[in-house]
Image (tube, grey):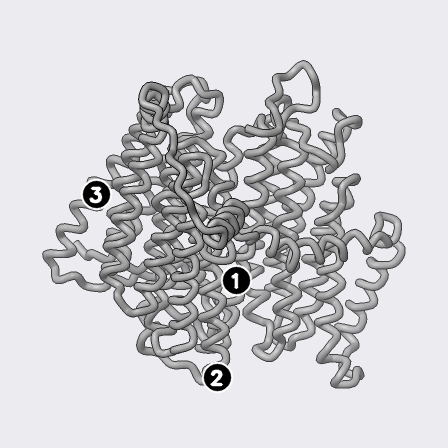
Amino acid sequence: MNMNSIPPVFVLVPLAGFLLSLLLPRRKERPIAALAFGTTLLNMLLFFAFAVCWLAAGQPELNREGICLYRSGTYDLLLDLYFDRIALVYLLVGSVLAFLITAYSQYYLHREPGFKRFFTTILFFYTGYNITVLSGNFETLFTGWEFIGISSFLLVAFYRERYLPVRNAVKVFAVYRIGDVCILLAIWGSHHFWHRSISFSELGQVQGTEGQGLMVFIALMLLVAACVKSAQFPFSYWLPKAMEGPTTSSAVFYGSLSVHFGVFILLRSFPFWQDLLPVRVLVGALGLVTAILAYFSARVQSTAKSQIAYASVSQIGLIFTEVALGFSNLALLHFAGNAFLRTYQLLISPSALSYLVREQFYHYAPRTELLRSAFRMRVESTLYVLALREWNMEWLLNRLVFSPLKRLGRRIRFVSVRNLFFFFIPAYLAGLALLYTGNTMPEWLRQHIPELFSLLGLMMVLRSFTERRNPFLAWLLVLMNHFWVVLAVSFNEYFDAGQVFIYLSGIVSGGILGGFCLYRLYRREKEYFSLNRYYGHVYEYRRLSLVFLLAVLALTGFPLTPTFVGEDLIFSHIHETQFVLAFFNALGFIFGGISLIRMYARLFLGPHVKTYHETDYRSS
């Protein structure tokens, strides 16, 4: 048998388990748990058998081209699978830990209201994990990356009747969204660097023709995405917030598997940036800074899960440094050890805490105070406060990025439903007229008009991001942003109508479906229909909540949707000199996705607004 035909099985098995789990009744715990347990066990046994055969065959690198989603000239959007020693280690750790977590969770989550939702999401995550590990190009990696991102949001917000888990889930998704768009920008840079679709197996052999500037840009985008995913400086603050989900999901996501994908990106792309000394120095420096800061933060945490989270972040910082130094085998070994250790620590943390409390109760010993110098006490107190405040990383990111854009969005009050129809739509029609009669435009105007149209779309997204009253307006503004993006990129000479149709077909269908859900909810809950707070309508409108979530995913460019193909086409047709246009489009996709998820969370998740439902305290 050809070994190239085996790796797709490791994606199809968990995918089949996920699809079958959707058909099971949510009150039947035993078949739900048995399906998840059997799926992960089968995948683990198949992988072990394949790994033995692969090692016996001399460890050949396997590259299999899968589905071609779109093909145009020299541009191919392929789902490509690739297997080597990096994939071997990640699949080995992932298969064992996924099996252990499903076996443990069937008892840990017994009689939990979201029992089926947990196991379905875990299988969905495991599918995305295998797609990412086996990805043979950036497009396939981005597909699995998106699977992991949405399953992460759903598991952080697993206790969706509480305020804090839902709020933290939105914060985690907002940070993840930065990494998503960095991957898109890296794909954009790679299209112009190689002028064709490139596979990971060719990264070390193929050289570009555009100079080192574009190489550094691609490497930096991958580094930012890696720092976001692995909670490295300055994004370390989100990892303890993600611990609001069940302990088992925290173990498999933020202790072992998902949090190490930043390391995976660096290892996979290392042949590309290994000769760029400034990038290697930056990767190593960020890893060392994160390791030191996370060590101090772990020492002052008041909860076991937060301590373990920062301990894991500190070790991942050291792994970043090992990758920068070229010690890839040591980094893989370190990843496996850290993943198994953190999973073990998180799973036993409830028992360990109970024993520790009992020990302190019966064998309490007061701390002996020693005389210390005033200077030493000031230094210790300063470090303690800074570590307790997580080195102000969240405040810094909000101050430099989110808060200025929020203030800007609040000032764009003229973007209303009335002005949308009386000003922006006529402006859009005028832009279409310029597109088809633009041969008489001056060259300087033709060069800058795409940036102007993209800026108008970004203004609409920022207005949607800060809208608190009218969900219809927030939804419509995100839709309009996609139309402005298409118009802006259409001024580039080789973005044809067929590609526009692919992109907008996903946008229009998702927009109509989401608008219908909002209308249904408005007709039934007029008093509780705004974005001022979390309303928890999922209690009474479970199916409507699911349909609206699917519409949100369609608009955010979830993989295998027309929007996903269209987003990749949009960036592939932005010229290599149009950095401003790419930046505006990237910001629009970031805040458009955050705005949509925020709408879903505020309308359907959180404590129910009606008093006859149980509600939890704001703090968990």
State the residue position of label 1: 182
Would residue 343 appear left or right of 197 to someone viewing this image? left
Where residue 305 sits: x, y (%)? 41, 36
- Foreground of the two, 565 or 209: 209
State the residue position of label 3: 46
Q: How busy is the neighbourhood of tag 3: few (under 14 within 10 Å), some, or many (20 plus)?
A: some
- Does residue 281 appear anywhere in the picture? yes
**Mark 1 or mark 2: which comes first in sequence?**
1
Is disc 2 placed on a helix, strand or loop? loop
Q: Residue at x 50, y 31 (%)?
A: 158
Would residue 521 appear left or right of 25 to someone viewing this image? right
Label 1 sits on what residue type? Answer: Cys
Label 2 sits on what residue type? Answer: Glu
State the residue position of label 2: 210
Q: Residue at x 42, y 73 (%)?
A: 279
Gap between marks 2 and 3, in whole Å? 44 Å
Is disc 3 placed on a helix, strand or loop? helix
Q: Residue at x 63, y 59 (%)?
A: 501
Label 3 sits on what residue type? Answer: Leu
